[in-house]
Image (spheres, rainbow, N blue to C red):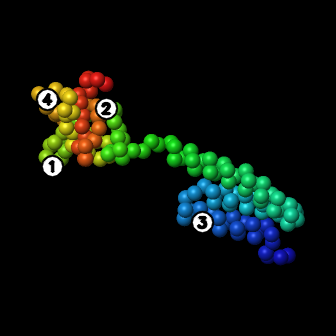
Amino acid sequence: MDLITPALLWLLLGLGALVAELLTGSYVLLAIAAAAALTALSAWIGLLLTGQLIVAAVSCGILVPVAIWRLRGRNRQRSFGVAGAGGGAGQRFVLVARDFDNAPSIKLDGDLYRARLDSESDADLALRPGDEVTLVRFEGTQAIVRPAGEGS
């Protein structure tokens, strides 16, 4: 009995693809590893090299586009925007006090941004922690807000 069989070679190829998948995190190598496993199964049941290559080609032709589709779907699931690019504009926030200076701030994606009233808002109004505000825009690292009841 031979120790090195075509099925074992295909399984080793699939194992190598799985190890590379662990290092990269792309689903494409996972699809190639699955295709290699299917080809190893076809070699184990007795298909000749031509049949094994056909199984490898067809399974890669099906599984790799599915993996690419899965990768594209993963990037669209979460909207991303940095603060300066308008991320969070229009959202409502409850002001919190910053630890070191008690300045009214909003918490956006785990980060605190000092809040300042929009120039169009009532200038007599002072921001206090606990107030509900709507984010208008960012100017540098300051969040320009207006009271939640105004124009929202």
Looking at the rendering, in which quadrant would you find the N terminus? bottom right
- Residue 150 lies in what quarter of the image? top left
Secondary structure under badge 4?
loop
Note whether 16 is above or below 62 in the view shown.
below
**Other residues around mark 1 within 10 Å, as few (<14) / some (14–19) / many (≥20):** few
Q: Let me know if residue 26 appears in the view.
A: yes
Residue under circle 4? 123
Residue type at mark 2? Arg
Pointer 2 or 3: first along the chain: 3
CA gap, disc 1 and disc 4: 25 Å
- Residue 64 lies in what quarter of the image? bottom right
Residue type at mark 3? Ala
Q: Can you give x and y, in whole percent of width and height, for residue 58 in the image?
A: 78, 54
**Other residues around mark 2 within 10 Å, as few (<14) / some (14–19) / many (≥20):** some
- Of the pair 59 and 1, the residue shown nearer to us: 59
Q: Are marks 3 and 4 in contact (CB under 8 Å)?
A: no
Pointer 4 or 2: first along the chain: 2
Q: Can you give x and y, in whole percent of width and height, for residue 50 in the image?
A: 86, 64
Looking at the rendering, in which quadrant would you find the C terminus? top left
Which residue corresponds to the image point at 77% horizontal and 58% vertical from the top-left? 57
Q: Nearer the viewer, mark 3 or mark 4?
A: 4
Residue under circle 2? 92
Residue under circle 1? 100
Q: Are marks 3 and 1 in contact (CB under 8 Å)?
A: no
Residue type at mark 1? Phe
Pointer 3 or 1: first along the chain: 3
Pointer 1 or 4: first along the chain: 1
Secondary structure under badge 2?
strand
Residue under circle 3? 20
